[in-house]
Amino acid sequence: MENNNKIYNKLQKHLWGVKKVDRKLKYLWWGVLGALVLAAGIKFLLPVKSPVTIEEAQGDREIVVYVTGAVNYSGLIHLPLDSRLEDALKKAGLRTDADIEALNPAQKLKDGQKIIVPSKLPAENGQTGSTGSASPSSASLSSAGVNSSRVNINTAGAGELDSIPGIGPAIAQRIIDYRMKNGLFSSPEEIQNVSGIGPKTYEKMAPYITVGH
């Protein structure tokens, strides 16, 4: 009988130990499960921010250019990044006398750029012609000496500038680019700031040019 009691007591102790271990495992399991639920809830409640792409970042940027001359609206124009001259002209609106041939609509614009849209000048025959055409012609300029119809270098297009003695197509385009970047010439002598026009070249063209606004 005594032996049976000892065996019974040992069996009870063993079972109690098993219950204690089982209880600890249950607590550990519930702790892990609670941590997982808490993490999932935080992830669900917090807003998820998607990464900003380069295109989206650039879409928020813009440039501001100043457009004046033969346009319906003269002033500051806000445009998206990487806009071209055509975009600025559409917003400003071209007047009927605008000399579009003197411009390059595909030109990329820069922030803070000043754009001067030239107007057409009346031809010698009294009709309004494009400044991009040879009016007055190079022949009339060369044969007339100091001609009374001087070319206005502030509004002349590429064709009319090309007709001035000492200026070819390349320099004519440089004059237009300089004018668009720096504004109107304040005096005929200022044209010497254009690359390719030195004192000798200016001496040839001086009798044929003037400035105006």
Image (tube, grey):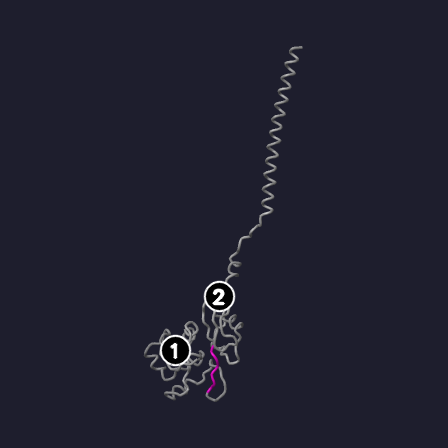
Q: Quadrant of residue 147?
A: bottom left
Q: Earlier in the sequence, mark 1 or mark 2?
A: 2
Residue named by callout 2: 63
Q: Quadrant of residue 196?
A: bottom left
Location of residue 178 with respect to 138 vertically, above or below: above
Q: Position of residue 195 (x, y in %)?
A: 37, 73
Badge number at residue 186: 1
- Left or right: 202 with respect to 129? left
Give the amino acid type for the residue marked by disc 2 in the picture: Ile
**Image quadrant of residue 28?**
top right
Q: Secondary structure at mark 2?
A: strand
Q: Position of residue 95 (x, y in %)?
A: 52, 78
Outermost residue, top direction?
1
**Neighbourhood count class around disc 2 (C-alpha, 10 Å): few under 14, some 14–19, many 20 upward:** some
Q: Residue at x 50, y 85 (%)?
A: 128
Q: Is residue 180 above or below residue 163?
A: above
Query: Which residues lie in the magenta part?
Result: 117-123
Is 148 placed above or below 17 here? Answer: below
Residue 18 lies left or right of residue 143; in this view the side is right
213 inside magenta stretch: no
Q: Name the quarter where the N terminus is drawn.
A: top right
Mark 1: secondary structure: loop
